[in-house]
Amino acid sequence: MAVATGLIAATGDISAHHSFTAAFEAKAPVILTGVVLRVEWKNPHVMFSIDETASSGAVTTWRFELGAPSVLLQRGWMRASLKPGDTVTVDGIRARDGTHYARVVSVTLGNGRTVFANDATNRGSTQ
């Protein structure tokens, strides 16, 4: 019974991880500015959400996928780099399914510093 439960739990984590090309359209870049709603530091990817306000005044919530926590730490991120309420500009690659979900290439923080979440020279990187 314990083995079966472990396999079921592991399957959920495995199915949540995906290849870049299966989930994201490399030819669909997005650059969005918005207010951070939530940040989740967990494996396999750090995630965060922003509310982006269009020029029409419409507000859209976007969810973003960053690299693994260990990769972000190596690239100068800290847990306090993004906090709810911060305004950020995100350069990313939109999900193939057309939802408001994207893989992050870089984030420009409120202090003007740009932090790379993935390899900016290869927009298809899966790091």
Image (cartoon, grey):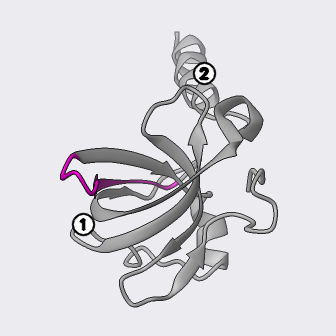
In the image, residue 115 lies at what x, y percent? 57, 78
Is 42 contained in the magenta span?
Answer: no
Q: Residue at image x 36%, y 83%? A: 110
Question: Alpha-carbon distance for marks 1 and 2?
Answer: 31 Å
Q: Nearer the viewer, residue 92 or 27?
A: 27
- Dot 1: few (<14), some (14–19), or many (≥20) neighbours within 10 Å? some
Q: Which residue is mark 1?
A: 84
Mark 1 vs mark 2, foreground winner is 1
Q: Quadrant of residue 71?
A: bottom right
Query: Is residue 120 shown above or below 18?
Result: below
Is 47 contained in the magenta span?
Answer: yes
Q: Secondary structure at mark 2?
A: helix
> Which residues are drawn in magenta?
46-58
Q: Nearer the viewer, residue 123 or 3?
A: 123
User: Residue 75 vs residue 45: left or right?
Assistant: right
Q: Which residue is mark 2?
A: 11
**Identity, as a three-letter code, of the amino acid under mark 2:** Thr
Q: Nearer the viewer, residue 65 or 94?
A: 94
Q: Quadrant of the C terminus?
A: bottom right
User: Residue 123 vs residue 53: left or right?
Assistant: right
